[in-house]
Image (cartoon, rainbow, N blue to C red):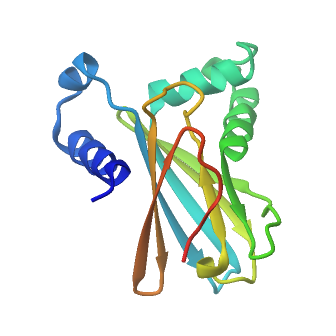
Amino acid sequence: MPARLIVALIALVATATVSPRLLDAHPLHSTITEVVEDRAHGVVRATIRVFADDFGTAVARSTRGRVSPASGPAWDLAVAAYAVSVFGIQDAQGRALALRSCGVRRTGDLLWLCLEASTTQSLSALRVRNTVLCELFEDQVNVVQATVGQDRRSLLFVRGDSFKPVR
């Protein structure tokens, strides 16, 4: 089994079963993203699960501290700007799809970020990049799970990775 896959599996298990106090003692830096196609509406949608405190730090750094969660709409714009700068989707020809926010929700210590892009191409023809928080943490591991019909594919991203094909 490749070492990167082992690291991803450890991160997934640990974030699902270890208490927050233990994570503070030995932090794990990971995100999980679910990418699905909605052919009826002609969109591909990505939902990124990320720890709120880490994401807040990344957004604050990306704005050089000019905005904070108390900034209201400016913070929302900064969240969307950071998200589309570190997560991307390309079509089969290598052109970037224009991502837009489709919402953010918070559940405890987690944020669920929704991004979507219009496309007529099947998800299986697209390429994805996920470098969320990689500029903050050397050990950042981002797992992307893409679902096309009944098929599911997992991609693993670490610092330095670029676009990878979904198929």
The foreground one among 108 and 122 is 122
Which residue does the image show at 73% across and 32% down from the upper left? 78
Residue 22 % position (x, y): 18, 23
Quarter assignment of residue 43: bottom right
The foreground one among 139 and 122 is 139
Q: Looking at the image, how many numbered discs can be counted on the residues?
A: 0
* Picture layout, residue 152 above or below residue 55: below
Which residue does the image show at 31% across and 44% down from the upper left? 7
Residue 107 % position (x, y): 38, 40
The foreground one among 74 and 53 is 53
* Picture layout, residue 55 above or below residue 157: above
Residue 1 % position (x, y): 27, 59
Quarter assignment of residue 2: bottom left
Q: In the picture, which quadrant includes the C terminus?
A: bottom right
Which residue does the image show at 71% across and 24% down from the upper left? 62
Left or right for 10, reference 29: left
Residue 61 % position (x, y): 66, 19
Which residue does the image show at 20% across and 21% down from the upper left? 21
Q: Residue furthest top?
A: 65
